């Protein structure tokens, strides 16, 4: 447990990376997601829920997130606030002062971790990151989940296929994020080697697109 209000960036990084990597498991499909000790990591999805890449995809209904309807005419923070399984992400974006930025014209591609993804970090990590003293670290973590431009599932698949199965994106935070496609499962690998998976893709926004992921992505901290 973290007992201090302020801890160093390096200490937060070590704690988060340890909790993400210590209980990683590998399933036959390649599943490996961050998990806290004693917590079962969710399996990689067999496929990714997304709007079809056909020419009429724009007319397809937006996927729901956490059972809530997503309005493609509204910006990313508004839709995220409506999703019951993205409440931790919304708190984090608010604490980091990124609501206005993510409400801007963009466009942005956001890999949005669910509440369960945040819950698999070491106990106390999220509460510590939400403290004002750790705003810089929180901002670094959150912006590692954002890529400039609007990148759909079809585009991710095409880029990865053209590159032999894995492509690399440069995040707003500045560090790379690897994307691997295997049997329609889209795997994200952060710079520390931790993996997460897109569970719901192509959630269209007025200023970009959101792909819901089942793990928290971590940049280099410290």
Image: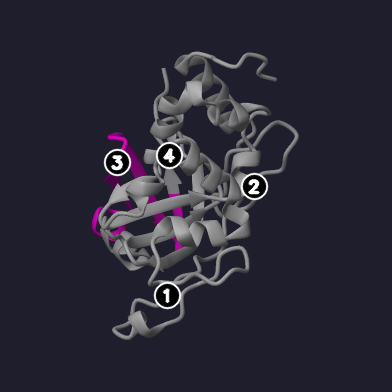
Q: Tell me whether the residue at label 4 lies in contact with that at label 3, contact meaning CB atoms closer than 8 angstroms.
A: no
Of the pair 67 and 220, the residue shown nearer to us: 67
What residue appears at the point 61 percent right and 63 percent down from the top-left corner? 66
Q: Mark 3 points at which residue?
A: 172
What residue appears at the point 40 percent right and 67 percent down from the top-left corner? 74
Residue 118 position by quadrant: top right
Q: Where does residue 160 sit, x and y in percent of width and height?
A: 30, 56
Element carrying mark 2: helix
Q: Tell me whether the residue at label 1 lies in contact with that at label 2, contact meaning CB atoms closer than 8 angstroms.
A: no
Question: CA gap, disc 3 to disc 2?
Answer: 24 Å
Residue 91 sits above or below residue 205 on the image: above
Element carrying mark 4: helix
Q: Mark 4 points at which residue?
A: 142
Q: Is residue 168 magenta?
A: yes
Of callouts 3 and 1, which one flags the residue occurring earlier in the amino acid sequence? 1
Q: Tell me whether the residue at label 2 lies in contact with that at label 4, contact meaning CB atoms closer than 8 angstroms.
A: no
Of callouts 1 and 2, which one flags the residue occurring earlier in the amino acid sequence? 1
Q: Which image quarter is the N terminus in?
A: top right
Q: Mark 2 points at which residue?
A: 116
Residue 198 sits above or below residue 99 on the image: below
Considering every residue shown, the one lying at the far right of the view is 38
What residue appears at the point 63 percent right and 14 percent down from the top-left corner? 4
Of the pair 108 and 213, the residue shown nearer to us: 108
Q: Mark 1 points at which residue?
A: 51
Element carrying mark 3: loop
Q: Tell me whether the residue at label 3 lies in contact with that at label 1, contact meaning CB atoms closer than 8 angstroms.
A: no
Question: CA gap, disc 3 to disc 1?
Answer: 25 Å
Q: Does the magenta stretch include residue 206?
A: no
Residue depth check, mark 1 versus mark 4: number of the one nearer the observer: 4
Boundaries of the magenta span: 160-187
């Amino acid at each position: 447990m973290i007992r201090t209000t302020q801890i160093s960036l390096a200490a937060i990084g070590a704690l988060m990376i340890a909790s993400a990597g210590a209980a990683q498991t590998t399933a036959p499909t390649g599943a490996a997601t961050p998990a806290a000790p004693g917590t079962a990591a969710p399996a990689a999805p067999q496929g990714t829920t997304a709007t079809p890449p056909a020419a009429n995809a724009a007319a397809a209904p937006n996927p729901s997130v956490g059972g809530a309807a997503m309005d493609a005419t509204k910006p990313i923070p508004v839709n995220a606030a409506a999703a019951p399984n993205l409440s931790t992400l919304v708190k984090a974006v608010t604490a980091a002062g990124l609501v206005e930025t993510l409400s801007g014209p963009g466009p942005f591609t956001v890999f949005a971790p669910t509440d369960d993804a945040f819950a698999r970090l070491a106990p106390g990590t999220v509460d510590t990151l939400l403290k004002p003293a750790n705003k810089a670290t929180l901002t670094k973590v959150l912006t590692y989940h954002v890529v400039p431009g609007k990148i759909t599932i079809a585009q991710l698949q095409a880029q990865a296929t053209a590159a032999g199965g894995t492509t690399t994106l440069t995040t707003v935070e500045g560090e790379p994020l690897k994307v691997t496609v295997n049997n329609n499962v889209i795997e994200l690998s952060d710079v520390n080697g931790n993996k997460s998976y897109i569970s719901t893709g192509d959630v269209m926004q007025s200023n970009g697109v959101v792909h819901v992921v089942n793990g928290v992505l971590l940049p280099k901290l410290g």
